[in-house]
Amino acid sequence: MLRGKQWAAMPILMLAVIVGVEAQGGGKGKKATTPEEAVKFIEQAFKAGDAHAALDQMAEPSRTLHEFELTNLLTDEALRKAFDDKFGKDPKFVAGPSVKELLQALKGLRVHAKQDKGGGKVELKVWVTDEHKPGKTITIEHTWIALKQGDAWKLLVPVGGPSGKVATRKGPDGKDVEVEIGESGKDPDPKEIGYIKNSLPKFKDLMEKLARQIKEGAYKTRPEADQAVRAALGAFRQANPPPKLDTKEGKSEEKKK
């Protein structure tokens, strides 16, 4: 179900605790009085491993998209743990970092520039610095949009990773700094957001049920359990087909028919 680029995009994706990362403070429940403060609250939440608090700073549809991404990662992590606890670790599988470890790989968020667009809307150039390998960091410049909603500022945070393009910027000390430019991706179709909101709770329930069945001994062997999971996911996809989106490609294909 994933649609993002796992973690060059992770400092902006890990934003909801669905099945396992405990809230630990951070920016949870706080109302940002400025766009910069909203960014600061997300940074605090990441460093605390508190994904709920980070999600709390986001505006729709960003919140739904990031919840979707993270639910996939967390449910997969929980299911994998159920397999390992019941049948032992699979020597053929190389596990990556945990969700909490990915959250805490964030080394810093900094608003490099901003532009007031009027009407309670501010464009931010946010530098996201992440330790993608031990001792090695990468800084990606993302474009976020801050929106004034009531008495608080919320953030539109696109789903996307680095584009591979590098730009030179002036750092806070006046020296040249090379940063990668982040991809913003396409704006989500309203049908897609509706589909996610409708299907995500059912997907989460299914994955939790499968993990529970494995723990309770419903399957005698790992292959038997794996086959049951694959069958259940296949049935879920058939019962919950994604909507047909109004894309240029789709329209051109219809004309050909």
Image (cartoon, rainbow, N blue to C red):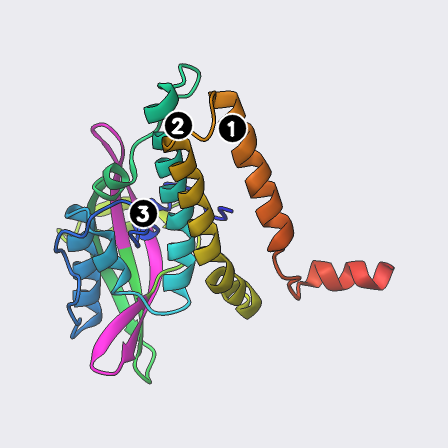
Q: Nearer the viewer, residue 115 or 157?
A: 157
Q: Residue at x 52, y 35 (%)?
A: 229
The label on residue 19 is 3
- The residue tagged with tag 2: helix, strand or loop? helix
**Tags 2 and 1 in contact by the CB under 8 Å rule?**
yes
Q: Residue furthest top?
A: 91
Residue under numbered circle 2: 83
- Looking at the image, tell me whether mark 2 or mark 1 is earlier in sequence order: 2
State whether the magenta stretch is mostly helix, strand or loop: strand
In primary-sequence order, the first of circles 3 and 1 is 3
Q: Which residues are magenta?
A: 127-155
Label 1, residues with CA under 10 Å away: few <14, some 14-19, many ≥20? some
Is there a contact, CB below 8 Å, between mark 3 and mark 1?
Answer: no
The kind of secondary structure element at disc 3 is loop
* Horizontal side, residue 51 vs residue 70: left or right: left
Closer to the camera, 182 or 134?
134
- Indicate the amino acid at tag 2: Phe
The answer to whether residue 146 is visible is yes
Q: Position of residue 88 (x, y in %)?
A: 35, 18
The image quarter containing residue 211 is top left
Residue indicated by mark 1: 226
Q: Is residue 131 above or below residue 40?
A: above
